[in-house]
Image (tube, grey):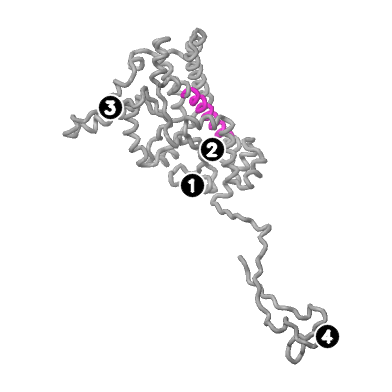
């Protein structure tokens, strides 16, 4: 805040001048003539304070102790490097955010962002209106959460037809390996979800007099026969051995990709949701899909998703992935970040496989 400082002229500061005791005027000692300084009353002057050394930013956050404690645990556990603290301006919240970014980037973040639109957050309350990283309470329980910002898209039809020409049971095997590996970590919307939606709509319309005139999406008709038949999927070990006999370059890449995805998905266990967490999420909608898997562009599966998506956000959805940990426990924090790293590796392999499949789509 600027201040008004009053300064008076000091006539005694000059040389060769003296003050007249009778009049208070200044007289020049040599000439006896009143100087001009004495003719004008002393005035006031503005003084502009110097701002050098004054902080240009002040921040206040609740839960500063919790954030600082977690920052310390991140360094102690080896997850974060001490120099990040200075890059983050010694701000524990920025330090935690930068650490998350660094870990994700080191495990394929830029590549994942090309085809899977996922967000990773650190929260202390799973309630949608709860606290985020800047409002951490001083408690010890926190969560890493993964939520899709929008649903990604993959067309499986051309891939399944290509695989069917090599072995009649490969399409079902590939589909199961692909969806199961990703579903362990995020939600994939496929023809099975669409079939459940159609059945739900059919039940709703049964009591409606005009329900018979409603045309429901033909999900069965949109599902390839290779998935609707009585085939059993091949064992993964057989696929690994069969891969050595495949000469088609695209088929080899697809099979290698789905095997790598399946292997990565088994590198860690998805944390189990405790009863207390389930209670907090009791009023939430199911997780929104991170990926929509259709057989052809604009088919019945895509139509079912578009219709169902209109109500997915009526209530706040659950996160796709919830990783709980104790912020003051080194082993707990390390295990949580290892789980996140496994998930990132799965997403990276998934994105690579999605790119291969979409190359076959005209």
When asked about the image quadrant of residue 333, the answer is top right
Crowd class of label 2 (few under 14; some 14 to 19; many from 20; radius 10 Å): many
Q: CA distance from mark 1 to mark 2?
A: 16 Å
Q: Which comes sooner in the sequence, label 3 or label 1? A: 1
When asked about the image quadrant of residue 80, the answer is top right
- Tell me if 252 is positioned left or right of 203 in this view: right
User: Looking at the image, which is closer to me, 116 or 198?
Assistant: 116
- SS class, disc 2: strand
Quadrant (top left/top right/bottom left/bottom right) for the C terminus: top left
Residue 294 screen position, x and y as percent: 37, 25
At x 64%, y 71%, the residue is: 46
User: Looking at the image, which is closer to me, 44 or 31?
Assistant: 31
Q: CA distance from mark 3 to mark 2?
A: 43 Å
- SS class, disc 1: loop
Q: Is residue 349 magenta?
A: yes
| Relative height, residue 252 to residue 191 (above, below) | above
Q: Which comes sooner in the sequence, label 3 or label 2? A: 3
Quadrant (top left/top right/bottom left/bottom right) for the N terminus: bottom right
Instruction: Check residue 217 in the rendering and tell me which mark sits there, or answer none.
Output: 3
Q: Contact, CB < 8 Å: mark 2 with mark 4?
A: no
At x 57%, y 33%, the residue is: 105
Residue range highlighted in magenta: 334-354
- Tell me if 2 is positioned left or right of 355 in this view: right
Residue placed under numbered mark 1 in the picture: 131
- SS class, disc 3: loop
Residue placed under numbered mark 4 in the picture: 30
Q: Which comes sooner in the sequence, label 1 or label 4? A: 4
User: Looking at the image, which is closer to me, 351 or 41?
Assistant: 41
Crowd class of label 1 (few under 14; some 14 to 19; many from 20; radius 10 Å): some
Residue placed under numbered mark 2 in the picture: 325
Residue 261 screen position, x and y as percent: 50, 22
């Amino acid at each position: 805040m600027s201040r008004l400082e009053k300064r008076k002229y000091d006539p005694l500061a000059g040389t060769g001048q003296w003050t007249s005791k009778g009049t208070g005027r200044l007289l020049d000692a040599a000439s006896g003539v009143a100087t001009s300084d004495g003719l004008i009353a002393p005035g006031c002057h503005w003084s502009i304070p110097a701002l050098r050394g004054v902080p240009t930013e002040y921040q206040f956050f609740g839960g500063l102790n919790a954030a600082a404690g977690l920052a310390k645990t991140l360094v102690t556990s080896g997850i974060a490097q001490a120099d990040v603290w200075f890059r983050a301006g010694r701000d524990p919240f920025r330090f935690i955010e930068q650490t998350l970014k660094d870990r994700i980037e080191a495990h394929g973040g830029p590549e994942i962002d090309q085809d899977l639109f996922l967000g990773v957050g650190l929260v202390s309350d799973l309630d949608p209106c709860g606290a985020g990283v800047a409002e951490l309470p001083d408690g010890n329980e926190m969560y890493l959460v993964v939520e899709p910002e929008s649903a990604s898209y993959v067309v499986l039809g051309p891939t399944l037809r290509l695989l069917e020409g090599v072995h009649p049971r490969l399409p079902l095997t590939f589909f199961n390996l692909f969806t199961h590996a990703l579903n362990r970590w995020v939600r994939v919307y496929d023809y099975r979800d669409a079939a459940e939606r159609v059945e739900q709509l059919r039940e709703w319309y049964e009591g409606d007099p005009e329900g018979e005139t409603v045309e429901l999406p033909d999900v069965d008709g949109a599902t390839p026969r290779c998935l609707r038949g009585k085939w059993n999927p091949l064992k993964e070990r057989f696929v690994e051995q069969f891969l050595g006999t495949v000469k088609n370059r695209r088929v080899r890449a697809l099979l290698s990709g789905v095997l790598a995805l399946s292997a990565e998905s088994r590198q860690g266990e998805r944390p189990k949701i405790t009863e207390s967490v389930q209670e907090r999420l009791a009023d939430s909608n199911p997780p929104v899909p991170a990926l929509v898997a259709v057989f052809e562009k604009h088919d019945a599966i895509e139509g079912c998703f578009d219709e169902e998506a209109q109500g997915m956000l009526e209530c706040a959805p659950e996160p796709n992935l919830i990783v709980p940990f104790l912020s003051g426990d080194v082993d707990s924090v390390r295990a949580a970040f290892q789980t996140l790293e496994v998930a990132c590796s799965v997403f990276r392999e998934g994105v690579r496989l999605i790119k291969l499949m979409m190359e076959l789509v005209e």
